[in-house]
Image (tube, rainbow, N blue to C red):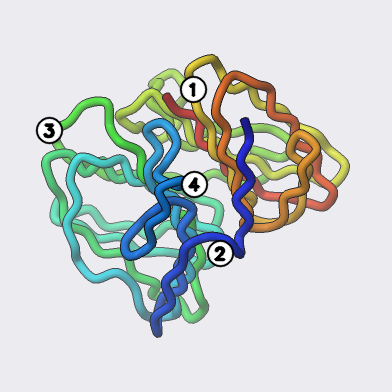
Amino acid sequence: MIDIRRFETLGQMNIDWLAARYHFSFSNYYDPARMGVGKLRVWNDDTIQPHSGFPPHPHNDMEIITYVRTGAISHEDSLGNKGRTEAGDVQVMSAGTGIRHSEWNHEDEPTTLFQIWIEPARRGEAPGWGARPFPKADRANNWSVLASGDESDNALPIRQDAKVLGATLQAGHELTHEVGEGRYAYLVLAAGRIELNGEVLNARDGAAVRGAQTLRLTASEDAEIVLVDTV
């Protein structure tokens, strides 16, 4: 089954420095039909205004993946980690036994990003953070593994049987992804326009996938895609 989530149907919060859209129930947005798929619990689409952001706050026992769409986000945490993640690049925070962090847009333009939360397979482990660049040219018309619980993927590590994939699909090109038996997938179109198994997706639409099937993506215009495959 594929459940299309149109951008205009997403939960939302708007304050002076943040415009947030929620693919799943989060904060003050609650929809019992949108509680996550598999171990994926949160997919937020955030627009953060210049020189503002999330002040220090705590997390524990969650894998938090940040995919920057435009601009850049600067991270600082209670472990002493500091970093700036630019558009197209990814950071992962394993909250483990507990970590405090801030995420700030120090740029002169708005930053847009996806924040993705996946429940860990193991709780109570030491927290950690990491980031790395993922040049879009390296994933042209092909999937790139951005974060994974499989160490052989040479991606940012997460503590779950899950993968975060990214692709930039040029107009007229096709791409497939196999969702295995007993697994789930969630796909969001960061930019562009595609057909997913015959259904049109526009920028910032999402699709929840349950059950084994082949996903067939065809770009009607240049597109940027992020997909989570998880138990």
**Image coords of residue 201 (percent x, y):** 72, 50
What number is the disc on residue 133? 4
Mark identifier at residue 124: 3
N-term mark: 4 or 3: 3
Q: Secondary structure at mark 1?
A: loop
Q: CA distance from mark 2 to mark 4?
A: 14 Å
Pointers 1 and 4 in contact (CB under 8 A)?
no
Q: Name which of mark 1 and mark 2 comes first in the sequence.
A: 2
Count of marks overlaid on the render: 4
- Mark 4 falls on what kind of element? loop
Mark 2 vs 3, N-terminal side: 2
- Is 35 in front, or is 178? 35
| In this rendering, position of residue 84 left or right of residue 114 | left
Residue identifier under label 1: 183
* Residue lying furthest front: 32
Along the line of sight, the residue nearer the viewer: 31 or 10? 31
- Residue 31: tell me if it is visible: yes
The amino acid on which the numbered mark 2 sits, given as a three-letter code, is: Thr
Q: Residue at x 20, y 57 (%)?
A: 77
Name the amino acid type tagged 1.
Answer: Arg
Observer-nearest of 22 and 112: 22
The answer to which image quadrant residue 212 occupies is top right
Label 2 vs 4, first from the N-terminus = 2
Label 1 vs 3, first from the N-terminus: 3
Front tag of 1 and 4: 1
Up-down: is 85 above or below 210? below
Where does the image place residue 102, in percent across and percent down from the top left?
25, 64
Quarter the N terminus occupies: top right
Q: Are marks 1 and 3 in contact (CB under 8 Å)?
A: no
Q: Nearer the viewer, mark 1 or mark 3?
A: 1
Residue beneath disc 2: 70
